[in-house]
Amino acid sequence: MAVLLLPSQNLSRLSRLRILLDSLIILATVMTLYYYMLSVPMIVTIRLTLLEKTLGLLFTTASLVSLFCLLFVAFQTVNVGIRRVITLLTLAMVIFQVGNMVIYRYLLHSTEAGLTTGPNPGLLGGLTLIAMAAQRMQHMLSQDAPLEHGPTVLLEETEVFAHWKTWLVSLLVLIFALLLVSLAIQPANVYTSARLQIIEIGGTSILIVLVLRQALTTHELNNMKRELREKNAQLDTLVASDPLTGVLNHRTFVTRLDEEVARAKAQQTPCSILFMDIDHFKAINDQYGHSMGDLTLCQVARRVASILRPEDCLGRWGGEEFIAILPGHDLHSSHKVAEMIRMQIAQQVVSSENNLHVTCSLGIATYPQTAASRDGLINAADQAMYKAKHLGRNQTHMATF
């Protein structure tokens, strides 16, 4: 919980959970080794009640957890002064823990040789470091100047821990293999059964955490893949779309038209294109401004797209010109679609405030009757559109054979 509640704004919930699982793996390994080397001999050799043994194990566990959390907070804090204070407190706890290990060794020998032990040999050094930490903290609080801040250091981003996950599992397997080998080659004694239980409990705990960690990693990878697909889809849309109207841009439309012409050739089916130009668009820009012109383009694009089928394709050719692909449509059926588009646009009110209406002129070309290539279709439809304009605008004209 101490690791999860670290005061860092740079960590997401998944990051905190990942760090917690990584911390539990390391902590379980350290505790297993500690119990294997010291706690088992203490519990087996020294005559203690069940309550005393339980309290001793709980004290040792709490000390290791506190030490680990202090180390982690020292890595995470962004305040340089507080980081130094926490480092001093961490060193004090390390000295206390080393002193306890020395006492445990003395107690083990005292059961055989009648030795007695004194106070914790690290008591003086630990208290000195705690006093230094308190003095530094008091000095920081007494200053009127703002506290010095350093860059945020995430434990998993430091150089030491950058690639630790690549060799952690192998190291854990090696550690527990060595412990089992040491038990196998040593003659059986009073410690063997207890140490074997420690290895089983510690190994099982670490294995469970590793499985959870792998499941979390898989979940994160799936999320990253999904986000990457979404970003790529958004990027493809941005690259392929006209930024103003949202329809296909010129380059993407040309590619799509090549594909549709090739499909029509392969399937021997017709394919028509509609070339549209908004009438008097320059006058709209000059009289009402470019913002009204942009609004006109967007509304025309939406109205045309609402009439087209899902398999049809609409693109912005340039300026006020739009072009649509109608796969499977011949000249007759495409003329019906063009007239629907023309009438819909003519009925549209771009701006009720200015009572602005627009019209458009359309030209139609069809594969293979009009032309057999992409450029031929575009040129024919373009010429047909200009013919419609010359005939009075707001009308549809079909390209000649």
Image: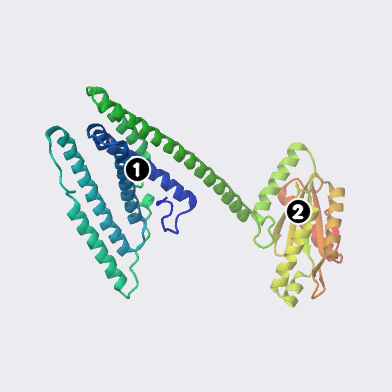
Q: Which residue is mark 2?
A: 324
Eyeballing the image, is 342 above or below 98? below
Percent coordinates x, y for residue 270 in the rendering? 80, 43
Question: Label 2 near label 1: C-beta < 8 Å?
Answer: no
Percent coordinates x, y for residue 125 in the rendering? 18, 55
Q: Which residue is painted at 35% across and 72% down in the image?
A: 146
Q: Which residue is painted at 45% across and 40% down in the image?
A: 213
According to the image, what is the colour scheme of the structure? rainbow
Percent coordinates x, y for residue 86 in the rendering? 30, 58
Q: Quadrant of residue 361?
A: bottom right
Q: Residues within 10 Å of mark 2 (few under 14, many from 20)?
A: many
Q: Is residue 397 visible?
A: no
For badge 1, the amino acid type reads Leu
Q: Which residue is more in the foreground, 230 or 187? A: 187
Q: Which residue is mark 1?
A: 27
First-in-chain label (1 vs 2)? 1
Q: Is residue 193 left or right of residue 276?
A: left
Q: Is residue 349 left or right of residue 58?
A: right
